Image (spheres, rainbow, N blue to C red):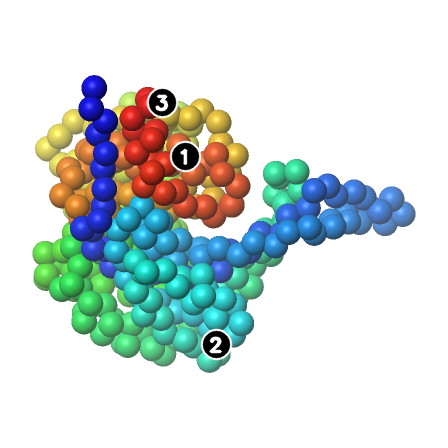
Amino acid sequence: MKKKLINFNNSLVLVVGDIILDCYWYSKNHYMLSEQLTPIVPIHEVKEQPGGAANVAKNIAEIGGHSKIIGFIGMDNEGLTLKKLMNHVRIDCDLISIKKNKTITKIRILSEKKQLIRVDFQEKYISEKINLLHQKIINSLSYFKILVLSDYAKGTLVNIKKIISFAKKMSIPILIDPKGMDFKKYSGASLLTPNLSEFEKIVGKCYRENEILQRGIKLLSELNLSALLVTRSKHGMTLFQTHKKPIHFPAISKTASDVTGAGDTVISIIAASLSSGYSLEEACFYANIGASIVIKKIGTETLSINELNFVLNHQ
């Protein structure tokens, strides 16, 4: 049987959202200082990765697509580090530096593959340059096939309704990774990709499968979405579309080393797939496989197109 190889070489995706620097401090072992019960963590490795919307852009580039990212960073060393990390032949960075803000940074301290603590710097980007951000989006949209809005509730997408209206006027599909308790601001999007926890915050706790299905269909209608994808960790993903029955994609891997960034991988593969002409069902199928690969990695990691194709052809 001939192998089916997918590629995203022709995909063009514009990514807008909260840009974060993810840092990982690794310790081989930690111990307690008995007199004060203070944990001692000898660090043997430090790793820095693009996080938030930057991880989405990197994911798209790593699977062979072309992406452009628009967002805020601070005028600091962390911002310079992010620029270096994003120096990729397939990523076009259009970043707005803010004097008064630090680059949002998350430091995770891990020992024996377990996270001990996360330290966050800078809660939100607060900028007077929102109009500049919007102008950059308007100037870029016509060159791209898909718009991804990566919302980490860090201030970049403070007026997301306006950004959605820009894309809708140009008939460009809008994919959104949502955050928070107000999903009405995402009304009219082409696809929303909440995880189960985020979904339940909006529709209520779901104890049975039919509750997820009923409430998913209802939310799809209430928000006037073209599609809704609920990612459900070890239970896979469920896709809701208007005038179609829900489709469930069972999880390929039942074990997860780290789910950090898995949602970024899912929306990245869907965006690259749709931009390349694959159907939404195919896009979700590929994304489900991609998620099964990255959750076996520690930290905010990406996957390559070769990894994706290998698993696709060895199921």
Name which residue lies at 64% across and 51% down.
45
Which one is in front, 237 or 56?
56
- Other residues around mark 3 within 10 Å, as few (<14) / some (14–19) / many (≥20): few
User: SS for tag 2?
Assistant: loop
- Other residues around mark 1 within 10 Å, as few (<14) / some (14–19) / many (≥20): many
Q: Looking at the picture, does residue 51 appear above or below residue 203?
A: below
Measured from the top left, where is residue 48 in percent x and y? 53, 56
Q: Looking at the picture, does residue 240 appear above or below residue 178?
A: above
Q: Which residue is mark 2?
A: 75
Quarter occupied by the C terminus: top left
Report, in whole angstroms, how far the alpha carbon at label 3 lies from the one at label 1.
27 Å
Measured from the top left, where is residue 121 in percent x and y? 56, 63
At label 2, the amino acid type is Met
Q: Looking at the picture, does residue 157 appear above or below residue 36?
A: below
Visible in this render: residue 34? yes
At label 3, the amino acid type is Arg
Quarter occupied by the N terminus: top left
Which one is in front, 10 or 126?
10
Disc on the earlier residue, 3 or 1: 3
User: SS for tag 3?
Assistant: loop
Q: Which mark is residue 255?
A: none
Name which residue lies at 24% across and 72% down.
136
At label 1, the amino acid type is Ile
- Other residues around mark 2 within 10 Å, as few (<14) / some (14–19) / many (≥20): some
Q: Which residue is mark 3?
A: 208
User: SS for tag 1?
Assistant: helix
Q: Which residue is mark 1?
A: 293
Disc on the earlier residue, 2 or 1: 2
Answer with the quarter of the image where residue 18 lies.
bottom left
Measured from the top left, where is residue 95 in percent x and y? 36, 70
Name which residue lies at 52% across and 74% down.
76
